[in-house]
Image (cartoon, grey):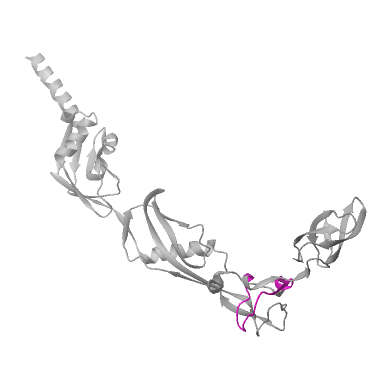
Amino acid sequence: MYSQIHISCIAIVVLGAMCAGADTITLKKEAYVKGPTVYLGDVADVAGDDAAFLRTIPISTAAVPGGMRRIDASLVLSKVKQAGVVTTDVELRGASRTTTKTLYLEITDGMIAEDLRQYINREMPWEPESTVVQIMSTAKRYTVGDGELEFRWQRNPQYAYLGQGTFRGEILVDGRSSLTFYVKANIETYEKVIVASRGVSRGESFNTGNTKMDVRALSSVKSGAYFSLADLKPMVSKGSIMAGQVITPRKVVKRQIIKRGQLIPVETTMGAMTIRAEAQALSSAAVGDILTCRNIQSKEELVGVVREDGVLVVE
């Protein structure tokens, strides 16, 4: 009799210990998840010796950001079993089904425009104070998963931050690419450029008497402009230029100081000695041009660079 009572007491103690050590999973009726994977710890309160491991068991993929997904208790139990857990050692409680809602961030037009504006101000070669940047509305609403948000931008390599251009935007959440989109922007910058203060005739040189500085939108002079009168010193007008017109590289040519057939001085250096001779130009040339000429005495052809004083320097 004593032995039977003793054995019964041991069985009760062991059973009590087993019950005390059992894991419990209490399924929530509703849960907010970050995604992209739903784990047991997201949808249930887990207690017991193996709670830390049980919480990490993947149950399902999350819905799209802002979306919902229902998960049945039977699926939860199945996933727990697939993870190698003996289901008889686990007690499943709570709701028979849980509704998961994926957390999200909403990307507004204002957020996109502000970040792109900052990018343009950093990257463009113009001064922000003299530049107008207009960001076109995307007319769309974007949602991404919850997390640390980062914008990345890329422009067409041929776009020079002038006029209208398209920028490729990429949104990263926690360092992972979430979506890409395109935004148009119009950039206008204003600079002081040289314009004709009066009509300039063909072949006329430029000076303070026929030019002035004026503020213009650079998008209106895509062929280029001059920002200093010193840059026009070796130039003359290629054709007639009307008063108020911007002086552009297309409207000027280098002043030719040597005519074809003209006899010109030639210099070449050999060590510390400078040798001078006279040669005949085989073509017309301006300052800085490479010119071929013929030595009057030896008939040898020489190639050099025209100096401002009209001397051909042969290396």
User: Who is closer to the viewer here, 261 or 121?
Assistant: 261
Return the x and y of residue 129 as percentages of the image width and height: 55, 72
Does residue 220 appear in this view?
yes
Tell me which corner region of the image, top left, top right, bottom left or bottom right, holds residue 14: top left
Return the x and y of residue 254 as percentages of the image width and height: 71, 69
Magenta-drawn stretch contains 244: yes
223 sits to left or right of 8: right
Q: Magenta segment, principal secondary structure?
A: loop
Q: Residue at x 40, y 68 (%)?
A: 136
For the image, the number of numbered tags is 0
User: Who is closer to the viewer here, 264 or 116?
Assistant: 264
107 sits to left or right of 306: left
271 sits to left or right of 130: right
Magenta-drawn stretch contains 129: no
Tell me which corner region of the image, top left, top right, bottom left or bottom right, holds residue 251: bottom right
Residue range in magenta is 230-249
Q: Which part of the image, by quadrant, shows the N terminus?
A: top left
Tell me which corner region of the image, top left, top right, bottom left or bottom right, holds residue 151: bottom left
Return the x and y of residue 302 as percentages of the image width and height: 82, 55
User: Who is closer to the viewer here, 245 or 19?
Assistant: 245
As drawn, the residue found furthest toward the right would be: 273
User: Who is closer to the viewer here, 41 or 215?
Assistant: 215
